[in-house]
């Protein structure tokens, strides 16, 4: 019961809307024809629904194509002892892919009580400030067999990261880059790394802040962050 509490919290204010009884009946009939007894089918159905949300341009604006996510996960090679974070988690695509990678390449972790508990309760961490995204992401993790992922509400650029500094061994992310934000609202620990209003540079600073020494990251940033000509961009690229 305790493990279900985080998902229950995200779903507390959710509203389930169907425009007509006929549409609901059609959905039930189609799902009834699918074999839903295994985790892969449930996850695939949910991923298909997410792709339709993204194509509609609502709540899926920053959804990363699955083949891009898979390539980034393959490059970083998650291990059963990693502590993974996506500070702009959205639908939890990166966390789900990392979990599937571990199931494929490290199946023995589930025979070790300590590693199995870590997989379900400590390995996956994600933050977002959109309650709808949190609901979608938490459900996505549950349907892909992760029982207690830490998917929580947080404005990653506005809140202090003292408690999380150096905590994570792997960061996977495709954060939103919406231009500029209020400098005064930016977390002070990020301002000490880079003084800017540009969200792309602030997210890079955040990744550096969250990673432990020797940690690794695969993240998507605008092209100019690494190869632009401005002074602030060159400083940011040097940090990498």
Image (cartoon, rainbow, N blue to C red):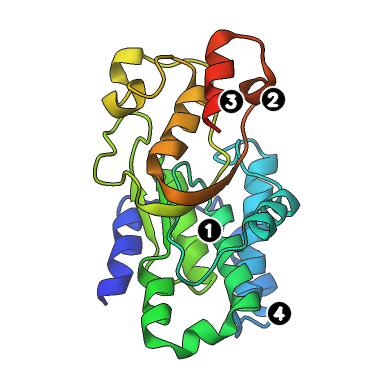
Q: Are marks 3 and 4 in contact (CB under 8 Å)?
A: no
Single out the mark in the foreground, 1 or 4.
1
Mark 3 highlights which residue? 237
First along the sequence among labels 1 and 4: 4
In the picture as drawn, the residue positioned furthest to the bottom comes out as 111
Question: Is residue 91 among the parts visible in the rendering?
Answer: yes
Distance from Cα at disc 3 to Cα at disc 4: 52 Å
Callout 3: SS: helix
Picture coordinates of residue 8, whole percent (x, y): 31, 63
Q: Are marks 1 and 3 in contact (CB under 8 Å)?
A: no
Callout 1: SS: helix
For the point 60% across and 9% down, which residue is it? 230
First along the sequence among labels 3 and 2: 2
Single out the mark in the foreground, 3 or 2.
3
First along the sequence among labels 1 and 2: 1
Return the mark for residue 95: 1
Picture coordinates of residue 127, whole percent (x, y): 40, 46
Callout 2: SS: helix
Single out the mark in the foreground, 1 or 2.
2
| Left or right: 179 as drawn, with respect to 54 | left
First along the sequence among labels 1 and 3: 1
Mark 4 highlights which residue? 33
- Foreground residue among 120 and 10: 120
Callout 4: SS: loop
- Foreground residue among 197 and 10: 197
């Amino acid at each position: 019961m305790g493990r279900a509490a985080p998902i229950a919290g995200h779903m507390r204010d959710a509203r389930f809307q169907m425009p007509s009884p006929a549409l609901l009946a059609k959905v039930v009939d189609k799902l009834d024809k699918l074999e839903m007894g295994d985790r892969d089918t449930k996850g695939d159905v949910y991923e298909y629904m997410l792709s339709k949300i993204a194509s509609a341009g609502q709540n899926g604006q920053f959804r990363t194509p699955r083949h891009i996510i898979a390539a980034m996960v393959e490059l970083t090679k998650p291990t059963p002892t990693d502590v993974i974070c996506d500070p702009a988690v959205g639908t939890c695509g990166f966390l789900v892919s990392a979990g599937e990678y571990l199931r494929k390449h490290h199946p023995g972790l589930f025979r070790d009580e300590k590693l199995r508990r870590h997989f379900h309760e400590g390995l996956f961490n994600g933050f977002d400030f959109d309650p709808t995204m949190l609901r979608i992401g938490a459900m996505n993790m549950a349907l892909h067999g992760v029982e207690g992922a830490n998917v929580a509400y947080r404005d990653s650029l506005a809140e202090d990261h003292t408690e999380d500094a150096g905590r994570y061994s792997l960061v996977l992310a495709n954060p939103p880059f919406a231009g500029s934000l209020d400098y005064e609202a930016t977390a002070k620990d990020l301002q000490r790394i880079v003084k800017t209003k540009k969200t792309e540079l602030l997210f890079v600073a955040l990744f550096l802040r969250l990673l432990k020494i020797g940690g690794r990251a695969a993240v998507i940033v605008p092209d100019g962050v690494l190869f632009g000509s401005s002074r602030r961009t060159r400083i940011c690229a040097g940090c990498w």
